[in-house]
Amino acid sequence: MILEILEYPDPRLRTIAKPVDELTDADRKLIDDMFETMYDAPGIGLAATQVNVHKQILVMDLSEDKSEPRVFVNPQIEVLDGEREAMQEGCLSVPGFYEDVERIEHCIIRAQDRDGKPFEIEARGLLAVCIQHEMDHLNGKLFVDYLSNLKRTRIRKKLEKLHKQSA
């Protein structure tokens, strides 16, 4: 089922997600729906916060052919190398805008999979950036928060105008 993606400046995007105590069938259905929504958008990552579910769940697939779906439940990050890399980011909750954001380029992610099984991966480059971007959503933060006030205000005003036109 395709879910509605909240768009900036919707205040619900600022809600801090709660950890998942125990994965349920409803959570697994949410994960499936999040993948369907992300692929339909189309995007490479989606946090539960973006579909107005405030649980620490992320889905991601960086492959060209939708062959590498990844699920991160209760993700935690450990920085391995403080080097920062600027990469152009976009966001399904900020449609049509792409800006350079600096993020840590080498980290370890600890999380649980869709069955609650713990795992750990070392991430670099796009994977590291994407995970940090999606984890920000779980903390009520958006990539526009890294931009200047001027750029952020311009983006917000353009999106508010588009929302009014489509309402």
Image (cartoon, helix red, strand yellow):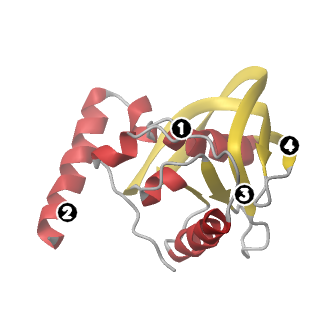
- Given this view, does label 3 or label 2 mark the residue nearer the observer? 3
Q: Is residue 16 visible?
A: yes
The x, y position of residue 49, in whole percent, is 47, 51
Q: Which mark is residue 71?
A: 3
Q: Give the Cα distance between marks 4 and 1.
A: 18 Å
The x, y position of residue 69, in whole percent, is 74, 66
Residue nearer the viewer, 97 or 37: 37
Q: Give the Cα distance between marks 1 and 2.
A: 25 Å
Label 1 sits on what residue type?
Answer: Asp
Q: Give the Cα distance between marks 4 and 3.
A: 12 Å
Q: Which mark is residue 136?
A: 1
Q: Which mark is residue 121?
A: 4
Mark 4 or mark 2: name the one nearer the start of the chain. Answer: 4
Residue nearer the viewer, 15 or 18: 18
- Given this view, does label 3 or label 1 mark the residue nearer the observer? 3
Left or right, 73 with reference to 50: right
Residue 133 to residue 81: above or below: below
Helix, strand or loop at disc 3?
A: strand
Assess disc 3: are there few (<14), some (14-19) or many (≥20) residues with their C-alpha within 10 Å of its C-alpha.
many
Helix, strand or loop at disc 4?
A: strand
Residue at 52 percent of width and 35 percent of height: 101
Residue at 45 percent of width and 71 percent of height: 3
Q: Cβ–Cβ below 8 Å for labels 4 and 2?
A: no
Label 4 sits on what residue type?
Answer: Ile
The x, y position of residue 134, in whole percent, is 58, 46
Residue at 57 percent of width and 73 percent of height: 33
- Given this view, does label 4 or label 2 mark the residue nearer the observer? 4
**According to the image, label 2 marks what residue?**
162
Mark 4 or mark 3: name the one nearer the start of the chain. Answer: 3
Quadrant of res 65: bottom right
Label 3 sits on what residue type?
Answer: Val
Residue nearer the viewer, 166 or 137: 137
